[in-house]
Amino acid sequence: MWGAPRYAAGAMSQPEPRPDLLAEPQPARAREAAPAPSPNALSRLVRSLRGLPPAEAWWGTGCAGKAGWFRAESAPTTDVTARFRELYTQVRQSQPVLPDEAPRHLYLLVKGLLGNEMFGYLEDNRVRLERRGLRTHEVPVDTEAALEANIEVVRRAVEDAAFFQRSVVLVGHSKGAVESMAALTLYPELRETVRAVVAIQAPYGGSPIADDLISSPELRRVLDIAFPLLFYGVSRSVEDLSYARRMEFVRRHPYLAQVPTVAVASSRSSRRSMLWPLARYMRERYGLPSDGLVAQVDAEVPGSRLVRLEDLDHAEAALTGLPGFANHSPGNLTEALVALALES
């Protein structure tokens, strides 16, 4: 039988020692860990933003009272939210909404801060317009550069269109919309070429997040180090969106909306939003509804036809979201906004 002991001369025979059992046990060789992938610039920025201290634990008043500072000294807006919702419903039902003149224009898309770091940014917006037979062109702004540098890029793009006798519709998101409007302000001759402007979630008055990043010594040190090393840019691109910089620029060069302008000012307070921590931060610290990066009131471009939405965060307008998490399609949104802009 297997395993039965062997006996010799009434004594149990001892098994011969095995060298491999007598040797001291060796510690298991540690498996070399694969190098962790280095997070890209965008993910590192999001991580730093999510690290903002809780509002109740933050000392000081911050930028309280600055949101919407320009309203008292600017032209009023015209609320066209109801008309937008009509167009948006028609777009979702695959009904045509664009006017006959739409194919005659060139649609210049201007990305916002860090747009070049985000895969698919403004892609759905562009594809939708092209599927409707419209010609588009992405303005080659450096999405990590300062405002003044990108204004010149927008100016050249409009001048190129004018050279080929093409009228233009500027479609800008976030900082890209600010740069588009600034170009029309500094170079009024461009208005002859621009048929309309669509300003989506533009921090026209500034941004509480940008302001807090600049004014907090701790966060400012992170920003000054992170931008040159991670984004190959400068912290000036964020500083340009602070309240102090926007006040200085707008008071010297106010946007008069002499070109038909549709602006989107939105907010979203939902845990399904990827920007929920930032939206909660602004609501708790300042009592401001926001899209997660821009306070809703700061996106109300003076003199514009204004669309106010309470279910759109700052990412959803330019990036395709996950089903069940995003409320709007960037393509549907852009088509409806362009149709709205060309009605005037």
Image: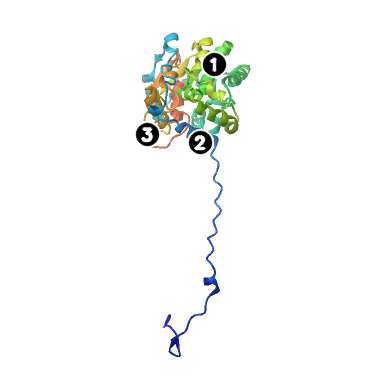
- The residue tagged with tag 1: helix, strand or loop? helix
Which of discs 1 and 2 lies nearer the camera? The answer is 2
Residue type at tag 2: Ser
Instruction: Please tell me whether mark 3 or mark 1 is closer to you in this view.
Output: 3
Q: Which mark is residue 182?
A: 1
Read off the residue under disc 3: 271
Q: Are marks 3 and 1 in contact (CB under 8 Å)?
A: no
Could you say which disc has been placed on residue 43 in the image?
2
Q: Secondary structure at mark 3?
A: loop
Q: Nearer the viewer, residue 140 or 86?
A: 140
Q: Residue at x 42, y 37 (%)?
A: 322
Three-letter amino acid code at the position of disc 1: Ala
Indicate the quadrant containing the N terminus: top left, top right, bottom left or bottom right. bottom left
The C terminus lies in quadrant: top left
Distance in Å between CA atoms under marks 3 and 1: 34 Å
Of label 1 and label 2, which has the lower sequence position? 2
Label 3: how many residues lie within 10 Å, few (<14), some (14-19) or many (20+)?
few
